[in-house]
Amino acid sequence: MPHLTLEYTKNLNRFDPDEVLTLLNTAVFESGQFEEAAIKSRAIELKHFARGTTEPDRRFLALKVAILQGRSPDVRRELAARLMDVLRGYLKGSGDSVSASVEITEVFAETYVKETIS
């Protein structure tokens, strides 16, 4: 934990999901809230999507971050802002107009099971 899931529309220009995931993981680690090896991220390209009703080429990405419950609202807000800064910095100058969002959700320790299997 945390788990980062980045969904992005296939029509983004100059977008390297591997590069973005590395930047996001680094930002999460540098927050001081998580162990480096515990950060898990993935990117999912959306081939079928809609944003609004009038322009078919609108672009967006949505980052969802699941963390174990217990961190304060201030810590969660700071993490969301830190991650939005990464997305903003990466997308700026790409020539795209992109709607970007970051959502932090909490997972209950009582219902989360994790194990390293070898």
Image (cartoon, rainbow, N blue to C red):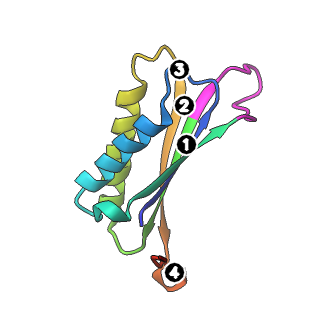
Mark toward the start of the polypeptide (1 vs 4): 1
Q: Which of the pair 45/116 is nearer the observer?
A: 116
What residue is shown with label 4?
113
Kindly state the secondary structure of the residue where label 4 is placed: loop
4 or 3: mark nearer the eye? 4
Q: Main secondary structure of the magenta part?
A: loop
Residue 50's quadrant in the figure?
top right
Residue type, numbered disc 3: Ser
Q: Residue furthest bottom?
A: 110
Kindly state the secondary structure of the residue where label 1 is placed: strand
Which x, y percent locates residue 13? 54, 20
Marks 4 and 2, how far apart in space?
A: 33 Å
Kindly state the secondary structure of the residue where label 2 is placed: strand
Disc 3 residue crowd, few under 14, some 14–19, many 20+, Cα 10 Å: some
Mark toward the start of the polypeptide (1 vs 2): 1
Q: Is residue 15 magenta?
A: no
Which x, y percent locates residue 116? 45, 76
Mark toward the start of the polypeptide (1 vs 3): 1
Residue type, numbered disc 4: Val
What residue is shown with label 3?
97
Marks 4 and 3, how far apart in space?
A: 39 Å
Q: Which residues are magenta?
A: 47-60
Marks 1 and 2, how far apart in space?
A: 8 Å
Marks 1 and 4, how far apart in space?
A: 25 Å
Which residue is located at x 52 percent, y 50 percent? 42
What residue is shown with label 2?
99
> Is the residue 46 above or below the residue 97 in the image?
below
Residue type, numbered disc 1: Ala
Q: Is residue 52 magenta?
A: yes
Mark toward the start of the polypeptide (4 vs 2): 2
Mark toward the start of the polypeptide (4 vs 3): 3
Which x, y percent locates residue 83? 37, 44
